[in-house]
Amino acid sequence: MTRSAKEMDLHVCPYQIAFILDNWIRRLLQPPTRVVGEYIRPGNTVIDIGCGPGFFTIDMAKMVGRDGEVIAVDLQEPMLDKVRKKSSKHGVDGRIKYHLCGKDGIGLNKEADFILAYYMVHETPDPARFLREVRQLLKPDGKLLVVEPKMHVGRRSFETMVEKAGEAGLVVLGYPGRKGGRGVLFGRTSTP
């Protein structure tokens, strides 16, 4: 069943305008290797939450190599379909798994070395619950990179999200620059 953001009553980018999420201009401004390259190694398990049309997914699949895997997660099946088409074209289709999540949860049972939540935490109906679920998906030494758009997420809202992450069992490892927005790198605490 094809689900759209409108049908789910969510404020997310609809798949019909996915082209604005993956184009040559964005690749110049937010090259995936610069944004996530330092966190991914060959053989890693990576989760791309809110993957959209696969702007980061395809590059991350190249980074994890033949022994790694990337799990592309999105609310909209048409977005996942776009990733499927691109992954085949780029020769990384065997490295990517596809997961259609619900609006109230991710619904994965997997541990990852790295998780990317790019421009999407502010779109979740309950960011605190989302962050608790993401913490459970991280390996003990795993990392979560959250980047939020400055045009939609003010400094105070971002700081509130960081506080909620702390309450969810995530610890701030740093505030990396040059990620294309307000960025924070989290690790997992030993207790939730």
Image (cartoon, helix red, strand yellow):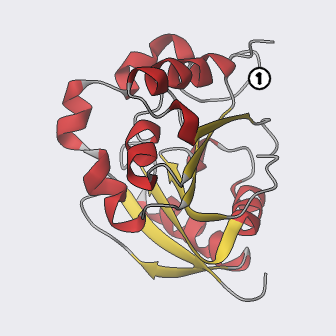
Q: In this rendered view, identify the residue nearer to me: 107 or 66.
A: 66
Residue of label 1: 8
Quick one: label 1, few (<14), some, or many (20+) residues within 10 Å? few
The percent position of residue 14, horizontal first and vertical second, equals: 56, 19
User: What residue appears at the point 56 percent right and 71 percent down from the top-left corner?
Assistant: 162
The percent position of residue 53, horizontal first and vertical second, equals: 48, 26
Q: In this rendered view, identify the residue nearer to me: 156 or 49.
A: 49
Farthest residue, direction front: 66
> In this rendering, would 1 be left or right of 172?
right
The percent position of residue 79, horizontal first and vertical second, equals: 57, 22
Determine the secondary structure under disc 1. Answer: loop
User: What residue appears at the point 24 percent right and 35 percent down from the top-left corner?
Assistant: 27
Q: Is residue 166 visible?
A: yes
- Give the position of the N terminus as an image quadrant: top right
| Residue 6, quarter of the rendered image | top right
Q: Is residue 5 visible?
A: no
